[in-house]
Amino acid sequence: MVVTAEDDGVSAHLIAEVDQLPFTAESLVINSREEWGPTRDAIVVGGPASAYIGDALMSGDPILGMTIADAAGGTSWTS
């Protein structure tokens, strides 16, 4: 399993921000191919292209969406 430095940094920043509020937070690294769903409120760091939960959450939302286009102009992916 690989966790990108960007995702790791975002997670640390979000936990620091949440800790300033009257909430508790914990970090959980999940397998990107695992069909996992949060059992309580959650912030998901990672996109639909790399994680099942990101795709499941974005696909089920009528407003959120994401398009990734290849810089060479060929391939695009939409959730």
Image (cartoon, helix red, strand yellow):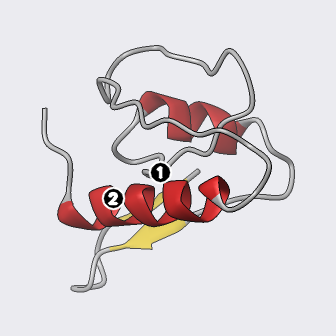
The residue shown at (39%, 36%) is 51
Residue furthest to the bottom in view is 72
Q: Amino acid at mark 1?
A: Val
Along the line of sight, which residue is nearer the eye, 10 or 78?
10
Q: Secondary structure at mark 1?
A: loop
> Residue 42: x, y in percent?
66, 36
Disc 1 crowd rating (10 Å Cα; few below 14, some 14-19, many 20+) is: some
Q: Secondary structure at mark 2?
A: helix
The reply, left or right, for residue 24 in relation to residue 51 is: right
Q: Are marks 1 and 2 in contact (CB under 8 Å)?
A: yes
Q: Nearer the viewer, residue 17 or 55?
A: 17
Position of residue 52 relative to residue 35, above or below, is below
Task: Judge left or right: residue 20 versus residue 22.
Answer: left
Of labels 1 and 2, earlier in sequence is 2
The answer to whether residue 60 is above or below residue 62 is: above
Q: Residues within 10 Å of mark 2 (few under 14, many from 20)?
A: some
Q: Is residue 30 above or below residue 10?
A: above
Q: Quadrant of residue 31?
A: top left
Quarter of the picture holding the N terminus: top left
Residue at image mark 2:
7
Residue 69 pos. (x, y %): 39, 74
64 to the left or right of 12 = right
The residue lying toward the viewer, choosing from 12 and 56, is 12
The residue wearing badge 1 is: 45
